Amino acid sequence: MATMKDVAARAGVSTATVSRAISGHPSVQADTAQRVLAAAEELGYVPNPLASSLRKQRTQVWALIIADINNPFLTQVARGLEDVASAAGYSVLLCNTDEDPRREDAYIGIAEQYRAAGVVITPTSPGTDVAVLQERGIPVVAVDRPLTAGLDVDAVLIDSRRAARAAVAGLVAVGRRRIGCITGPRRVYTAEERVLGYREALREAHLPPEESLVQYGDYKEEGGRAAMATILENDGVDAVLVANSLMAVGALDLLRTRGLDPGSDVEIIAFDDAPWTALLAPAVRVIHQPAYDVGQAAGQLLLRRIAEPGRQSRTVMLAANLGPETRR
Amino acid sequence: MATMKDVAARAGVSTATVSRAISGHPSVQADTAQRVLAAAEELGYVPNPLASSLRKQRTQVWALIIADINNPFLTQVARGLEDVASAAGYSVLLCNTDEDPRREDAYIGIAEQYRAAGVVITPTSPGTDVAVLQERGIPVVAVDRPLTAGLDVDAVLIDSRRAARAAVAGLVAVGRRRIGCITGPRRVYTAEERVLGYREALREAHLPPEESLVQYGDYKEEGGRAAMATILENDGVDAVLVANSLMAVGALDLLRTRGLDPGSDVEIIAFDDAPWTALLAPAVRVIHQPAYDVGQAAGQLLLRRIAEPGRQSRTVMLAANLGPETRR
DNA sequence: TCTAGGAATGTAATCGAATACATGCAGCGA
DNA sequence: TCGCTGCATGTATTCGATTACATTCCTAGA
């Protein structure tokens, strides 16, 4: 494996000049730079990122710390981020916390030790401690869920409260009156926001809030099934807002086993448009979340902050939209 | 940030002793080691993996190079691998090739430059060149798809030919006669294997092979839709074997738009049991692939080969099973 | 008592690139 | 012509851990 030293020898210059030529330092004369680049080419020289990182105390790696790699929303985010990353010469280290704060903390530690160039995270809670990253000057972008205000952290969020409110208002408009809500884990921002939107819509429609119609799940299939079962203990439930697609699967499956028809007996609106949701239209309506765009925006925020570390933090808010009543 | 030097100073020893004490080298006296560890603890010393990697020419990172991060089968593989990795102190760098050989090649280069401790890959073709990794002594495990024989590469495969054959035989047994097959891209091992299994079953049932009933898709939704449309140009098609769940979504969606009833008009059996496939039972039967186990097995092969580099390569073959006709 | 050998530890080189500081040389004004 | 400025390049240190080789000291055997 050719090193910088070999290139230097071949080009008849010092390693310092090689380093400068390769990184495009302006104080290298054009013909010298040419010679160096040619020598590097001939030797098939590839810089060793480990050595470079050790010296610079910074890698070309972004850490993406997400709650669940099986969640299609989050994998779309990952793609959006990855595309921005690889276009800019970064690689993405994917870390799966499983909503476990201890795993999350471990991965934050790894990102720090590896001197990640940036971290994109869906915090398990707003209190997730990213101070250790900030102290090291590693930029952090929170996606989907914010971190406690006061920290200098960029964020990309989806206005899911508004989307939830609009969805429930729509249900009211078509005559639904006893509307349930299956949301994610307590203290998870998106879960709470979606309930808030739901409650706002009920209030606006002068429908009474009923605590037993709101169930907190785990954002996974099983939680959706259990939550739906509990909600159905109330009589006359005629619609349910479900906070993500995996829980929607569980909820729909439970309806099926009870012999209820989603769409007529119980209308379902779910967040996230996974590929398969189209199959269930019009029984299920979906709220489209621009997942890929979220990942892209996160990557762009990271790039900008890497270029300009002192920049004031900002939050990008994207809209989620209720899909058409029938898909075709 | 405390370094080894600080620990050495505090414990009153040299950095060499610190290094040995921390890595558990036997030639360090017990009380010295104690002292060193105590000093490290007090200073909150954390080793710098970059420095360590530079010296050892090896990181604690595994690269997972997969075709599509949105494919639920592959994300399950990723989870299985990640669990083994983190239990053994490795992190996983996730790389998404999108079935593009050039991106694949770029990621192989990155894995090499970063001196990954191991690489797990779903090759875009059997000819994918991993020589550069092998020359550097980086162990490679092929998952889901093999690499050309002759290379000293471990592999974890699923016997999908047998599963495909059994599935089609089952279709024949219930009276289906004109059976189509939607498979993945040409030259992708699993895609070809599934067609082979399909053809074997037809042959055994003395049904004529018909080329127009076999369509190659892209393992994505859109490919499934297009393939199904082409197959339906044949009259009397009464069943279709689909090679993965994303294409099944497209195929089912097309049936729906044509007003055909999956399960009765056209029976569908699809590879991969995504969470939502349960919703479509009994219209669709699924072939369960042990994706998580594949990832785990890959991780274990990697660990063993890291421990014992000269070990002869082996292939682990796991079975895929046709699920019950109705799920409950 | 002397010495060979081994255990415990220290010294210093090493991995490969980046960069602070040093040097040499050309150009320019006085 | 002298000396200053600044560009181009070189020299040598640095990042932090690992490890080959050196040293010290103790013990056992002759």
Image (cartoon, coloured by chain):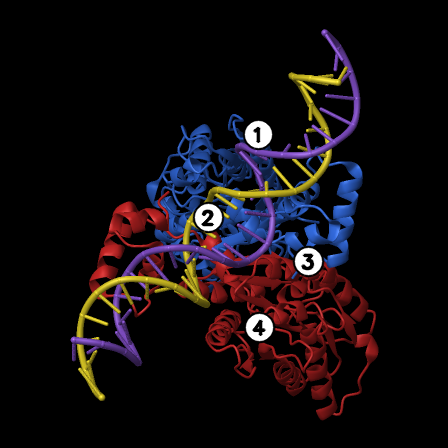
Chain colours: A blue, B red, C purple, D yellow
Mark 4 and mark 3 on one chain: yes
Residue highlighted by disc 1: A308
Disc 3 chain ID: B
Closer to the camera in the image, B165 or B26 = B26
> Helix, strand, or loop for circle 1?
loop
Disc 2 chain ID: A
Question: Image height check: is B42 above or below B185?
Answer: above
Residue highlighted by disc 2: A111
In space, the residues marked 2 and 4 are separated at their CA atoms by 26 Å
Disc 4 chain ID: B
Residue highlighted by disc 3: B106
Closer to the camera in the image, C1 or A15 = C1
> Is disc 3 in contact with disc 1, using a CB cutoff of under 8 Å?
no
> Is disc 2 in contact with disc 1, using a CB cutoff of under 8 Å?
no
Q: Is residue B216 visible?
A: yes
Residue A26: where, in percent of width, then height? 71, 33
Q: Earlier in the sequence, mark 4 or mark 3?
A: 3
Residue highlighted by disc 4: B141
Question: Image height check: is B179 above or below A256?
Answer: below
**Residue B104's disc number:** none
Residue B296: where, in percent of width, then height? 48, 71
Mark 3 and mark 1 on one chain: no
Disc 1 chain ID: A
Residue at image x 45%, y 62%? B90
Badge 3 local density, few (<14 within 10 Å), some, or many (20+)?
few
Taking A284 as reference, is D7 left or right?
right
Badge 2 local density, few (<14 within 10 Å), some, or many (20+)?
many
Question: Residue B72's image quarter?
Answer: bottom right
> Helix, strand, or loop for circle 2?
helix
Mark 2 and mark 4 on one chain: no
Question: Given the image, on which type of amino acid does mark 2 rest?
Answer: Ala
